Image (spheres, rainbow, N blue to C red):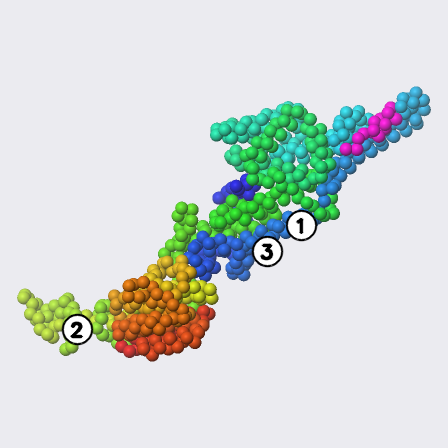
Amino acid sequence: MVIGKWRRRKRNKNYYAYSAWDGTQTGFELSADDIMSEIADDLMFDGDINSALRRLMQSGFDMDGERIQGLRDMLNELREQRQERLENYDLGGVYDEVSEGLNNVVDTERQSLDDLLQEATESGDERRAKITEETVTQRNLELDMMPEDLAGKVRELQNYEFTSSEARQQFDDLMDKLKEQLMQRYLDQMSDDMQNMGSEDMGRLKDMMSSLNEMLEQRAQGEEPDFDSFMEEFGDFFPENPETLDELLEVMAQRMAAAQAMMNSMTPEQQQQLQQLNDQLLEDMDLQWQMDRLSQNLQEAFPDLGWEQSYEFSGDEQVSLDNAQNIFEELADIDSLERMLSSVNNPSQLAEVDIERARELLGDDVANSLDQLSEIAQELEKAGYVESKDGRFELTPRAMRKIGQQALADLFKKLSKDHLGSHDLQHEGIGHERDFSTKPYEFGDPFNLDIQRTVRNAIKRTGGGTPIELSPDDFEIERTESLVRSSTVLMLDLSNSMAWTGRLLPAKKVALALQSLITMQYPRDYLGIVGFHLLAREIDIHELPEVTTGYMQGTNMQHALMLARQMLAKQTGTKQIIMVTDGEPTAHIDRNGNPYFDYPPSQFTIDRTLAEVMACTKDGIRINTFMLDPEPALSRFIEKITEMNGGRAFFTNRDNLGDYLLVDFVEHRRKIITSR
């Protein structure tokens, strides 16, 4: 349950705050592209945008020199703030200020009595002096006989007939202050007009609490209370003008729970003193009953507020009753914010946090970080990278393109410019792309006749008229651009060892980078993906981030090569397979179509795999292999593939896989172009 105090305060959309430049304003704004860059690797890990956002919120991140704190750091800071208060303060002196105030009242009264006696003595009137002495003695005796406990002393002073108007005023002021402090346990912030209540105001207060209790009990019975009528009659008690009954009750409940936590944290003697003081000051039985009733109703309505919470203080700094209430309200806010941040699963939930209260407790950096984190999902939605479905976020095709572009950019940063090839050709030839220019027909040219140019040439030659007579000299043909097309299947090893050693993530990242490269620079090219462990299957590029090893043993290269060959059979142009693996073949498909696994690999598995290599070679498919931290056995096997197929083998690792693979892809295309 989100507590009202932590709800984000409503903002006026037309309100703007301006301040002079002081060097601290950086103009920092979090963009959707920045966010996607931060979570790209997390998305490649499991493909779950919701998990990636949770991890981002938990850990935080750096952006343009600014640190966006994560929830983990915020929770640690909240715990430190709580511990600091517990280690600094001591509740042992919570009544010292009240006791000192009462003693001052007594001292002022005694001084007044002494002055009265001295004045009577100096008057020379013996009778007056004698009567005054008897009165002063009696009053001092009453003061001497007052009980030591606060409630008893308050009770006796309430019945005491003061001779000093100053002492009476001190006592009345002290009682008003204590009443106000005790009333604050129930009302968050009474209006100024209600802080010094007379008998009529006290009656309205009782009526207000009675109406509150009736609304709570109506709601508990499934009825809908008339909150608007309540606010019309008693709205002056609530200057913050709550708009709903929930908003009003949640604030009151949180405040009363904090007051209850203070009571729970006191010693039995302190608890007894506070209860007696409360009873003495709020002696109106009906008002006390309404307050107790309200407390019980709020506990039933908000059972998760920690009404049984207590704290152990170990510091030396004595606190007054007023300060103690403030400290416990801060502790309650800290606890509430901690509960909320601990349960956040979605950035949009942070919109419920009262940023300004968080700023008071934890400072500007944390408040600004909370504000930024709360807008992450909104920024991604506005940019079209995610969409909400059934309470969860899903990546859009645009987000997939963005991840691929980011992966491509990250990998290309490592490559020198002279390694990059292009599609530029210096000759024209037979093709299917129109160049929108023409030339006279020559013997041996493809007969791609441009009808308009040909007819125009005939009319120009003959001078017009019908029928139009054509001659070979009139023929004009369309020029076409010779195009290079490359078809590639990327084979990804999804065996368990790829995940255990952290090799799967960079391999998936390279696959997305290749797809992005082909889409942007070589749109006519084809890229297919095959994943293989015990079995092989075709993988759509959009499901690549979610692909895992499947926790299945086996490295079935034979099945993967078979699928890749079948996929390439449907394509045109130069064909190649790029295989990324960290292990030798340990599985194949038997004659019945079932997977067969054996480790160390059987000779039969190796023979079936090499037979598929030979089939690829006969179909003109080049196989280039990238071995990640290869063992000697794998190296020997890959050397055999290279010898049979004529492709290339690269010995690499997870850190520079992208460098080699992309260079090979581009260099391979350059080689294709040059050869034609």
* 3 and 1 marks in contact (CB < 8 Å): no
Q: Image height check: is 200 above or below 643?
A: above
Residue depicted at 26% across the width and 72% down the height: 619
Residue bounds of the magenta highlight: 135-149
Please state which of residues 333 and 561 is positioned toward the viewer in this rendering. Answer: 561
Please state which of residues 434 and 50 is positioned toward the viewer in this rendering. Answer: 50
Badge nearest the viewer, 2 or 3: 2
Res. 522 visible in picture: no
Report whether 417 appears left or right of 229. Answer: left
Res 429 quadrant in image: bottom left
Residue depicted at 73% across the width and 46% down the height: 317
Q: CA distance from mark 2 to mark 3?
A: 74 Å
Residue depicted at 84% across the width and 30% down the height: 144
Tell me where residue 241 appears, x and y as whole percent: 55, 35
Per the rendering, the mark at residue 22 is: 3
Among the two numbered marks 1 and 2 on one chain, the one whose residue lies closer to the N terminus: 1
Q: Which residue is mark 1?
A: 84
Q: Secondary structure at mark 2?
A: loop
Residue depicted at 92% across the width and 20% down the height: 127
Q: Secondary structure at mark 3?
A: loop
Kindly identify the amino acid type of the residue bearing the numbered disc 2.
Answer: Pro
Q: Which residue is mark 2?
A: 446
Per the rendering, the mark at residue 13 is: none
Tell me where residue 582 appears, x and y as whole percent: 42, 70
Res 102 quadrant in image: top right
Among the two numbered marks 3 and 1 on one chain, the one whose residue lies closer to the N terminus: 3
Please state which of residues 671 and 19 is positioned toward the viewer in this rendering. Answer: 671
Report whether 629 appears left or right of 665. Answer: right
Among the two numbered marks 2 and 3 on one chain, the one whose residue lies closer to the N terminus: 3
Q: CA distance from mark 3 to mark 1?
A: 31 Å
For the residue carrying disc 1, how many other residues have a C-alpha within 10 Å: few (<14), some (14-19), or many (20+)?
A: few
Query: Is the C terminus in the top left, top right, bottom left or bottom right quadrant?
Result: bottom left
